[in-house]
Image (cartoon, rainbow, N blue to C red):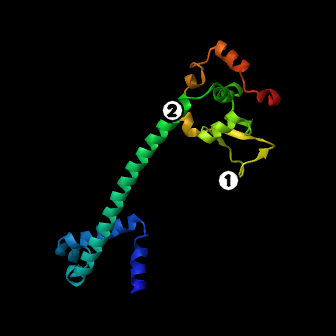
Amino acid sequence: MEKYLKAIFDLTKLPTKFFFLLSVVSGFILFVDQSFLNEKLFLDNAKEKYGWILGIVFILSTGLVLVNFVIWIFKSIQRKILLKKWKKKFTERVKNLDRFEKSILREFILIGQKSIDMPIDNSSVSGLLDKGILVMNRQFGNSSIMNGMKTSLSINESVMEILELKDIDLSDPPTEKEIEFAKNNRPEWTNKWY
């Protein structure tokens, strides 16, 4: 009995497309006119011989498709709610950056690169990493390369969708005065490396 129950639960691991196909085919055979089955598909008396099996297959497969559809709807709604909460959280983080964090993010504009080597032992850099605003670049598969206490960092792509120049005290496009201010207020670690 146990192996039969296991076989039933293994069936539920099959893709929904498979059950949808079973539902459509069994439903078609059950609900189409018998003369069409006999003349066009040469399935003589298929309903009479196998109707009870087709009925069970139709009910089970249609039920599984409906259950999977309902689960998909709930997951989609949940994903949208989580994404909205996530964007709100990151928007608040981006809008409340301190002057040191802003100067770090301005470096990407000043240097004109998407990736910069930064010291991860710097409190502002590590703070931006902890907040998820900066991310470590993956050079080889899932690993990062560190050179001493510095590593290659980029702005999180999701944060890039939210981040505006005014969040880092620049207008769009930045004025010469703002660029000069940004150059004069670079993070202290840039003097060592750039």
Please provide percent x and percent y for residue 185: 71, 20
Quarter of the N terminus within the rendering: bottom left
Numbered label attached to residue 142: 1
Please provide percent x and percent y for residue 175: 62, 14
Q: In this rendering, does residue 154 appear at all?
A: no
The residue at the point 20 percent across, 70 percent down is 31
Secondary structure at numbered mark 1: loop
Please provide percent x and percent y for residue 111: 71, 27
Q: In this rendering, does residue 16 appear at all?
A: yes
Where residue 44 sits, quadrant-wise, is bottom left
Viewed as shown, does residue 186 lie left or right of 1? right
Q: Residues within 10 Å of mark 1 (few under 14, many from 20)?
A: few
Viewed as shown, does residue 191 lie left or right of 41? right
Q: Amino acid at mark 1?
A: Asn
Q: Residues within 10 Å of mark 2 (few under 14, many from 20)?
A: few
Residue reaching furthest to the front: 123
Q: CA distance from mark 1 to mark 2?
A: 29 Å
Quarter of the C terminus within the rendering: top right
Q: Earlier in the sequence, mark 1 or mark 2?
A: 2
Numbered label attached to residue 92: 2
Secondary structure at numbered mark 2: helix
Where residue 181 sits, quadrant-wise, is top right
Please provide percent x and percent y for residue 101: 64, 29
The residue at the point 56 percent across, 25 percent down is 167
The residue at the point 63 percent across, 27 percent down is 102
Numbered label attached to residue 39: none
> In the image, is residue 18 above or below residue 100?
below
Q: Amino acid at mark 2?
A: Glu
Where residue 67 sits, quadrant-wise, is bottom left
> In the image, is residue 120 above or below residue 58?
above
